[in-house]
């Protein structure tokens, strides 16, 4: 067995998404010692995905004299954090539902395995190392290809009875009335506020074959294209309204906005803030919407932190007593 570097307490962390598997060795202080990445064989079944994950893990283990204390995962799908099993998943990863992540990975690596949903991991990373530092109660909402979220209460991730807490995109929205959502239902905020939904809205208005992506829509909006502005603003208002409604229920100390749309520019952010102000009750007037600070590293840091929960919760207790 390789000798472990003294005092580092590193964890091998993987972030498994529909396009790539990213990995890193992470120390307790949030520093990343090494990185590795593979393309996700998304359509080849769970065995192929597990094989690619193990290739990333092996590359990381070979990068230095490390013996990590565990393997932390942030994975697409509904994940049972108690068993590290994939309870359900979309067709983005073929055959992913039912995968026993701990069973598949522990035998090869010899490491204990802990796992949560990828957006939950993102929330944990921002709470411990990013925009949510110091907050006992934090809501993170990620707006990108879909809309997901993570809520931490008293420093602990809330996953809910069926481990689906955080499906922010599936809140009803008046802005999405009658529009089909990715879940197969209608009128959810994801159907108007996600990146692809904003693109579809623009094309319904403009029917512009020269615009091929949401990025193009954002660029057109910055140049003053009226239809692009409408699509971007409507999506932002819908997201902001949903955030205001959630804040009315959860009263988070910090509310963090992540995902690709968080880089769409001032027009989108102004619309999000306007939607929030219209929906949030007066007592929440001082609640700020904070941009995420860690980018894609957040999920890796959050996955690693699954092995450090007690340290994190103790630090919050100390902060509350001081």
Image (cartoon, rainbow, N blue to C red):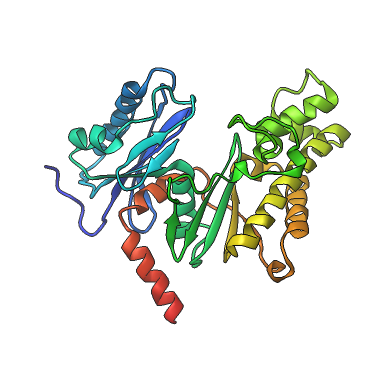
Q: Which residue is farthest bottom?
A: 322
Q: Which residue shows up at 20% across the image and 44% down it?
A: 65
Q: Considering depth in this image, is 44 or 267 the residue closer to the camera?
A: 44
> Which quadrant is home to the N terminus?
top left
Q: Is residue 216 visible?
A: no
**Image spot of residue 31 (x, y percent):** 38, 53
Q: Considering depth in this image, is 129 or 139 the residue closer to the camera?
A: 139
Left or right placement of residue 104 versus residue 218 in this view:
left
Compared to residue 29, the image places residue 266 above or below, namely above
Compared to residue 292, the image places residue 102 above or below, namely above
Q: Which residue shows up at 71% across the image and 22% down it?
A: 212
Q: Which residue shows up at 31% across the image and 28% down it?
A: 50
> Which quadrant is home to the C terminus?
bottom left
Q: Which residue is farthest left?
A: 1
Q: Is residue 64 visible?
A: yes
Q: Quadrant of residue 315?
A: bottom left
Q: Which residue shows up at 32% across the image and 58% down it?
A: 308
**Image spot of residue 155 (x, y percent):** 43, 63
Q: Quadrant of residue 57?
A: top left
**Image spot of residue 215 (x, y percent):** 70, 32
Left or right placement of residue 79 versus residue 294 in this view:
left
């Amino acid at each position: 067995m390789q000798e472990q570097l003294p005092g580092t307490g590193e964890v091998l962390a993987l972030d498994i998404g529909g396009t790539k598997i990213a990995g890193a060795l992470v120390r307790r202080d949030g520093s990343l010692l090494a990185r590795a990445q593979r393309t996700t064989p998304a359509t080849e079944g769970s065995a192929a995905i597990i094989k690619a994950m193990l290739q990333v893990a092996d590359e990381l283990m070979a990068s230095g004299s490390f013996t990590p204390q565990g393997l932390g995962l942030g994975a697409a799908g509904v994940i049972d954090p108690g068993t590290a099993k994939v309870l359900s998943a979309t067709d983005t990863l073929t055959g992913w539902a039912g995968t026993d992540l701990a069973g598949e990975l522990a035998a090869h690596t010899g490491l204990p395995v802990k796992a949560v949903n990828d957006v939950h991991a993102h929330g944990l990373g921002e709470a411990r190392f990013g925009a949510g530092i110091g907050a006992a109660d934090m809501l993170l909402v990620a707006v990108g290809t879909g809309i997901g979220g993570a809520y931490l209460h008293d420093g602990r991730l809330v996953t809910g009875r069926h481990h689906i807490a955080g499906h922010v995109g599936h809140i009803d929205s008046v802005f999405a009335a009658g529009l089909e959502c990715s879940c197969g239902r209608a009128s959810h905020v994801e159907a108007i506020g996600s990146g692809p939904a904003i693109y579809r809205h623009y094309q319904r208005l403009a029917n512009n074959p020269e615009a091929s992506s949401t990025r193009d829509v954002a660029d057109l909006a910055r140049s003053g294209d009226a239809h692009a502005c409408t699509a971007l603003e409507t999506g932002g208002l819908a997201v902001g309204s949903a955030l205001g409604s959630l804040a009315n229920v959860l009263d988070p100390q910090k509310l963090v906005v992540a995902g690709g749309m968080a880089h769409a520019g001032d027009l989108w952010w102004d619309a999000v803030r306007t939607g929030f102000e219209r929906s949030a009750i007066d007592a929440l007037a001082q609640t700020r919407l904070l941009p995420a600070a860690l980018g894609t590293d957040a999920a890796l840091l959050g996955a690693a932190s699954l092995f450090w929960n007690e340290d994190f919760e103790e630090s919050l207790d100390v902060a509350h007593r001081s």
